[in-house]
Amino acid sequence: MIKTVFITGADKGLGFSLVQRFLRAGAHVFAGLHQANSDLSYLAKSFPKTLTPISLDVTQLESVSQAANTVAKLVPALDVLINNAGVMLENRTPLLELDLARLPLFETLDVNTFGPLRMVQQFLPLLEKSDHKLILNISSEAGSITDCWRESEFAYSMSKAALNMQSRILQNYLKPRGFKLLAVHPGWMRTDMGGADADINADEAAEGIFNLAGKKWGPDDDIYMDYRAQPISW
């Protein structure tokens, strides 16, 4: 059983659905919030002992470090880290119209790629004290180089491809210490990012990811997959 989990980007969409799913399973959930959320505040009233909201900006190392220190004061170990926080700040802008001097393009990489790396670095001591030792990065099929069909969405797609490489490197580095890394495509979801025409709702994706998090993984098992555990080509 997963006793403790930290979920970034927990204020809405998939993150909020993941918080609810792990709470129902009895886990102590640390919910990383970039902004206040009234739904989460209401949820905390139902789970006062097992839901701990924590203010978090994954682009700021000090914020990530403070979050890790807060968790360390409350629990002896962290079983699962779910790096869910992510942004998509561009439209399908053609190359010749793309403003490569515009900050949001680089902010995408800062949140989607370097945000998870900051989280792993600062939470590693807590994760190492667990027997579960799972780091689950919310990636995307957009990060697949083999199956790429896009002609734009450079920053988002590149950020997820880089996150996949990060997951592979971390698995190589942490495998001798009993860790497992997963890079999971959550499906095309009806969220602010996915839009109303998407295939599934966030609760369905959260259920699949919850099942992945609870599975017993071998160190050489697949890393890159969708929420139903179907492998995706790198």
Image (spheres, rainbow, N blue to C red):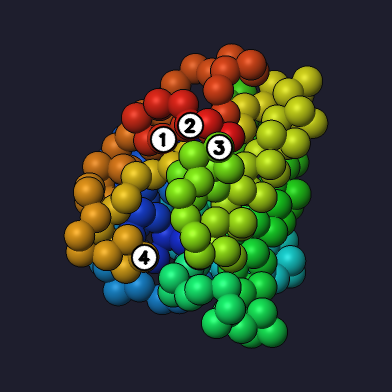
Element carrying mark 1: strand
Disc 1 crowd rating (10 Å Cα; few below 14, some 14-19, many 20+) is many
Q: Amino acid at mark 1?
A: Asp
Q: Amino acid at mark 4?
A: Met
- For residue 232, the mark is 2
| Separation of marks 4 and 3 at Cα, in angstroms | 23 Å
175 sits to left or right of 143: right
Residue ID at (73%, 36%): 170
Element carrying mark 3: loop
First in residue order: circle 1 vs circle 2: 1
- Residue 121, visible in the rendered structure: yes
Above/below status of 216 relative to 229: above
Q: Looking at the image, which is closer to me, 65 or 220?
A: 220
Can you identify the residue that label 3 sits on? 146
Q: Amino acid at mark 2?
A: Ile
First in residue order: circle 4 vs circle 2: 4
Above/below status of 16 relative to 126: below
Above/below status of 25 relative to 143: above
Q: Which quadrant, please, contains the N terminus?
A: top left
| Separation of marks 1 and 2 at Cα, in angstroms | 7 Å
Cβ–Cβ under 8 Å for marks 1 and 2: yes
| Separation of marks 3 and 1 at Cα, in angstroms | 15 Å
Can you identify the residue that label 4 sits on? 193
From the image, state whether disc 4 or disc 2 is nearer to you: 2
Can you identify the residue that label 1 sits on? 226
From the image, state whether disc 4 or disc 3 is nearer to you: 3
Element carrying mark 4: loop
Q: Amino acid at mark 3?
A: Thr
Residue ID at (33%, 34%): 208
Where is residue 116 drawn, in percent x and y?
64, 53
